[in-house]
Image (spheres, rainbow, N blue to C red):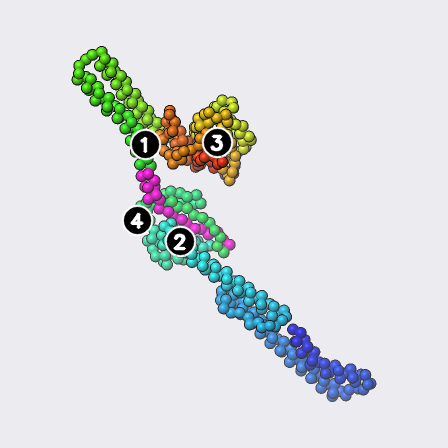
Amino acid sequence: MTALVLWILSGALPSVLLFVVAAAHGARLSTPLVGALAVASLTWLAIVALRVRASIQRHSRRLNNLVEAARAQDYMIRAAVGPETGELAELYRQINALINDLESGRHAEQELLAMLRKVVGQIRVAIVVCDAQDRLRMVNPAAAALLGVAPEALIGASFADTPLAELPLSAEPKIIDHAFSGVESRWQVSQLWYRHQGRPSRIVFIVDVRQVLVDEEILMWQRLIRVIGHEVNNSLAPISSLCQTLETLLARGDSEARQAAIREGLQVIGQRARGLQEFISMYSRIARLPDPDKVLFPVRHLVDRVRGMFPEGALAPSGDVPDVRLYGDPIHLEQALINLIKNALEANTGSDEAVVFLVRVRDANCEFEIADAGPGIANPGNLFVPFYTTKTEGAGIGLVLSRNIVAKHHGQLTLENRGGRSGAVARMTLPLPPQEA
């Protein structure tokens, strides 16, 4: 820029000096000479103006080419900048640096996108991504196989024109029975929303849960058969043995001693039969748990009722109870809490510490915590196995019932050992209704 200014001034400098010298000597310049100098100066200035315009146009074209290439994601074009200094040279260096950053970002984005495509292509979850116009933008192989169409044929199709439009989609996953391409199965369907071009767009997920449910059902039946087989064998073994003994006694004839032995054997058979009947009754309690009668009620009322069920001093002070409400069956939830607290009190046998019973709100959930100072959990894998118990007089259904109650309220029940000390802690977590969260 400095060189350009000096070049412009050099054209007008001779004329200016001539006028200055003439004025200093009192000389008068002739009219033809003045005209010639004026024409020469104007011609020089015109030439300079054309050169300046050409230079500006050249730089403008270079800048436009750089910007257009960057917008087209063509990062091979750079501005040639040598050791020049000045504003234009610095501008070109900054544009080159910006293009380098854009190229690096594009490479990183392409690598990440390639990795995500590989992951999405390998997983067995059907995934469909739509754009802002609700047209299919990406379909992974699992989704294409589900719909029975090649992925390329689905790209660009309207979501409303696909079988997916019939699904009851929402952010909350739903289990449905549906036939895709003539194949009936059980599916978990859900959708998430993201923004594309500033407008909300959807991603649909479809999971075949049939095999998962079958595996879980098989595992459940194996556990149940193991427990029922153990209980039935415990009853049938002594009954079978006593029947053989009684048959032998009857064959030997009738006497007072033999009659007493027969009566005693019959009493044992009756006891084992009643025990087996009680076992079946307890199983029925688990299998036939009624659906909860849900209402909106204050948590404080539930806590007060539960604390009133136990002697004073059995439970440590619980502090402030959150002033929130739950949507659920207060009778069922009360029973679940009573079961957990009874277990904690039994674990505390021989300890001077009271059972800790706390209630707090965390992450839009209401959390009930019951902690004891007992020996802790020795076999966590069997905690929720029906009829499994470590108590001499335990039935093994309290925790199972409590977990079933909590599950019907879309909550979670966990038990674990207390960290850093003896004892166990049970946490019953229930979701707060939207107006309370």
Residue 77 relative to residue 242: left or right: right
What's the residue type where badge 3 is placed? Ala
Instruction: Reply above or below: 330 against 125.
Output: above
Which residue is label 3 attached to?
A: 371
Secondary structure under badge 1? helix
**Upstream in sequence: badge 2 or badge 4:** 2
Q: Quadrant of residue 255?
A: top left
Which residue is label 4 attached to?
A: 182
What's the residue type where badge 4 is placed? Gly
Q: Nearer the viewer, residue 301 or 336?
A: 336
Discs 1/4, front: 1
**Upstream in sequence: badge 3 or badge 2:** 2
Q: Residues within 10 Å of mark 4 (few under 14, many from 20)?
A: few
Q: Residues within 10 Å of mark 3 (few under 14, many from 20)?
A: many
Q: Residue at x 19, y 13 (%)?
A: 254
* Alpha carbon distance from label 3 to label 1: 28 Å
Which residue is label 2 attached to?
A: 120
What's the residue type where badge 2 is placed? Val
